[in-house]
Image: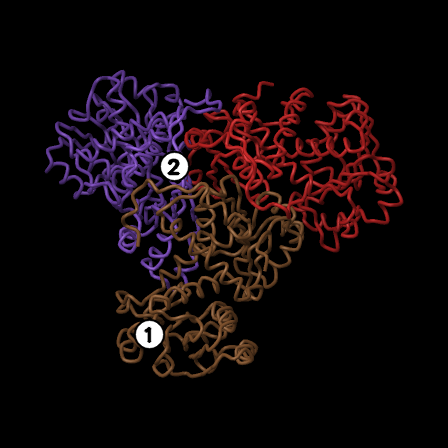
Chain colours: A purple, B brown, C red
């Protein structure tokens, strides 16, 4: 893929070399996301951060990423946009809004809406999540986290053994992650979920077709044995037709210190796309794991910023210019990390 | 008018020489709005973008314009402002908020509220629309678009023949545009609307008094024959006491390729203040006109940014300093326009 | 207190020398808040301005303060945060959001929530108001205003005579101010309120313990006689269990020109934390006092910006670097103040 000026709409756009390109730029940008250095490479550029569905953390992660490159952010969180109510087409909205910025991030509650928007947009559009369809930056930050965490133990994604746990039916993060993992060789995925929340057949067959070894199970202890990564998820209550149906699955698959210690290897990494449900009845990852150094869930969220910075830099074609305006940071940052 | 430090509250403040001044600054600023160059002339300045009525596009257009001059934007979209609920006067709000910024843009649902606010404000205030009263930057960007589009065919606003079509009773954009057109000589305006949605008498008599030739009609084909500009509008459903009354006017005046081709000149420009209602029952401008190069509706929206930049630069007195911090853009912009 | 990297959660953290430090930095920053000079000392830094309770003016005051130091602002005003609805703990939210910024300002409707958040935050957190608990920057800006206004008449806070008037039971600003005044010597406080809205006993006993002379009264004329400062407040209607109870206290304690002239000294300063209720039935400060040069209520609001700038500069450790990026302002500012 030529990132320059491209829309980033789906994880399907990425092949292995695209991912390698992205990750190498992300690595280069870490001193900036870690607040060791400042760059102003996008000073004067504007991000249109268009959130037609609420998502505080994704919105702020994209906005912060753009600010860290020196750019300005204009945004909306107005859901019942008055213009749409007045009969405006999404393409008209795209034509107009794309005139106000150099790049657009869009989140929308409707499947396919971001792609539709991108067709009329005069600037590159990054998909920040469209309904239950795509959320490509989540998959990319998950994969980047996996690679970084494995590297500590001198492992690679080729050869990865990972357990995906929880609501595999409705979990958009898990769907995209399974897609992108199929680009790697010698991968084993343990799918652990209640019978009713299994990974949909289309994703399953894609995995098998691409040579991934897949094991399905309802048993957490069995499924997490011998894996490099345990990827926990939340029961996606809001996607159930009957909310009361969701309740019976909550708490069925909870990871705590005892289960982890008895079944995992010493360096097994724990991930979660967040937010995690910490209420007693769900408690996907128990608080007794908070001090475990393999709990990577907040590093994962941090990686979202640097992955989004890398995407902006690639799509706007400024990777080679980042150093030009680079300088050391001048304020107090000792509390960070 | 001396723009320096002035409030911009009404289109009535502008005479022809003011408009010429504004448009010449706008032209000078086009390389910046078109992302060919960057200026940081307002770096350190703050715009208070106060929207007490939702309007995503106008809000972002003003904010982007300020960012493009290098300034920062603080804004609110909180409508039921808690302070007003607690009995605070608009003048107190103005005193306080004007202490937080160098210039304020304000939109409010109540007629006259922005002028009231400006009386207590300690910084210049630009009216971003107050109820059905004024929205001066819309009229200015419309006029700027007319001038630019005519210039391509070596025509000027003096001598203009324009058709204003649709809801001329409630359409605020049309009211302000008619006012400002009366500053020019040898103008002919064809007013095309259902009988019940005619231009209010006060605007009509002002037009006639200033020498504009006015023709009223209910017939679209007749009205658009021989004009330089067709200015379409939306039925302002939300301003009707009875919404069901609005429905019967929808779709009465729709422009499509066939009607355009049979009645217009080859270079007749199509404008619309947007949003346009693209639903089947209204369809003010048919999608079969989307590829027509004379469809200027998105250029019109783009012109909003540069007109607002020009206003900011004039009111804050930095026109002569724009070049001082000017530099070429360093990111990828090939997709634009 | 070592400001460097600290959370600012409560007014109790401040002793006299901390306040002196803060005020001397604020004074140094006045040329910047008054738009005489620009500094870019925090260029590249990000403030996470997290408002989980609406408060337009406090939010914009903090945001503007950060912009005036050259930093960028990402913010939320989304109250029913979807993540909290999904069962996320405030500590998880803190972990994630603190990864997106260099410093966080947080306002929340629940007492103690900001402190809880700060425990998991990886960057310094400033309390922007948590329920009826704390709002430290309000007390600091009030005290700074008192010092500045007294200085004009060559008086100091040591020896201050002040009247606190109105709803002393629910008024958070008054509670914090009374705490911080107890750090000074030879202070006299006249507490003027209806019997049912008296200052809670805990605050009263703290004042007496620290040597403050306290006089309680229901009579405005009596209470404001001989004081340096009259600090008016609003009946906090929203905190009454029965809103109808609040109504009977409105208008009981209203200051107007006649009462002021007959009872106050020529230089007695009038303050109010704002918003003030200007409706006929409440009218805490009559409009006939608007031209009185001792009415300091808007200077007080302005001081909020410079106090917040000073806090940011101290907590992020950049006080000594402000001048490095300092330059004269280049835009028109004649209307200000």
**Image: A182 above or below A331:** below
The one of A151 and B103 positioned closer to us in this rendering: B103
Judging from the image, mark 1 belongs to the subunit labelled: B
Q: Are marks 2 and 1 in contact (CB under 8 Å)?
A: no
Quarter of image, res B99: top right
Q: Please state if A87 lies on the left or on the right of B3 as rendered.
A: left
Can you identify the residue that label 2 sits on?
A61
Local crowd size for mark 2, using a 10 Å CA cut-off: few (<14), some (14–19), many (≥20): many
Question: Where is C171 relative to B34, above or below?
Answer: above
Q: Is residue A139 left or right of residue A280?
A: left
Chain under callout 2: A
- Tell me: B328 left or right of B216: left
Report the label total. 2
Q: Is residue A332 above or below residue A319?
A: above
Quarter occupied by residue B155:
bottom left
Asked if both marks, 2 and 1, belong to the same chain, the answer given is no
Horizontal and vertical percent for residue A175?
A: 23, 39
Residue lying farthest right?
C262
Which dot, 2 or 1, sits closer to the camera?
Answer: 1
Q: Nearer the viewer, residue A77 or B127?
A: B127
Is residue A16 shown to the viewer in this render?
yes
> Residue at 36% of width from left, 71% of height from top?
B282
Which residue is under mark 1? B255
The numbered mark at residue C333 is none
Packing grade of label 1 (10 A; few <14, some 14-19, many >=20) is many
Relative image position of residue C321 (x, y in whole percent): 53, 24
Secondary structure of the residue carrying numbered label 2: helix
Q: Where is the C terminus of chain B found, in terms of image quarters?
A: bottom left
Q: CA distance from mark 2 to mark 1?
A: 44 Å
The x, y position of residue A74, in whole percent, is: 43, 46
Q: Specify whether residue C109 is in view.
A: no
Q: Position of residue A163 (x, y in %)?
A: 23, 28
């Amino acid at each position: 893929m030529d990132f320059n000026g491209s829309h980033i709409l789906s994880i399907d756009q990425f092949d292995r070399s695209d991912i390698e390109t992205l990750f190498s730029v992300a690595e280069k940008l870490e001193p900036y996301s870690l607040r060791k250095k400042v760059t102003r490479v996008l000073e004067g550029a504007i991000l249109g951060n268009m959130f037609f569905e609420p998502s505080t953390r994704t919105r702020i992660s994209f906005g912060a990423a753009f600010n860290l490159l020196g750019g300005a952010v204009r945004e909306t969180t107005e859901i019942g946009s008055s213009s749409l109510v007045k009969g405006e087409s999404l393409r008209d909205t795209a034509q107009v809004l794309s005139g106000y910025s150099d790049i657009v991030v869009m989140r929308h509650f409707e499947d396919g809406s971001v792609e539709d928007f991108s067709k009329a947009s005069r600037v590159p559009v990054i998909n920040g999540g469209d309904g239950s369809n795509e959320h490509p930056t989540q998959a990319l930050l998950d994969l980047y986290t996996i690679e970084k965490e494995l590297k500590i133990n001198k492992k690679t994604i080729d050869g990865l053994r990972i357990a995906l746990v929880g609501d595999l039916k409705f979990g958009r993060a898990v769907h995209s992650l399974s897609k992108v993992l199929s680009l790697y060789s010698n991968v084993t995925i343990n799918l652990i979920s209640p019978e009713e929340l299994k990974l949909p057949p289309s994703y399953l067959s894609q995995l098998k077709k691409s040579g991934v070894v897949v094991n399905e199970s309802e048993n957490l202890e069995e499924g997490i044995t011998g894996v490099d990564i345990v990827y926990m998820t939340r029961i996606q209550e809001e996607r159930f037709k009957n909310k009361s149906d969701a309740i019976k699955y909550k708490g069925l698959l909870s990871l705590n210190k005892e289960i982890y210690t008895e079944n995992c290897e010493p360096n097994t990494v724990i991930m979660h796309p967040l937010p995690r449900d910490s209420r007693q009845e769900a408690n996907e990852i128990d608080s007794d794991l908070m001090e475990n150094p393999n709990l990577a869930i907040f590093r994962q969220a941090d990686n979202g910023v640097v992955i989004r910075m890398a995407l902006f830099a690639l799509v706007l074609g400024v990777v080679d210019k980042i150093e030009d305006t680079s300088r050391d940071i001048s304020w107090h940052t000792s509390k960070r990390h």
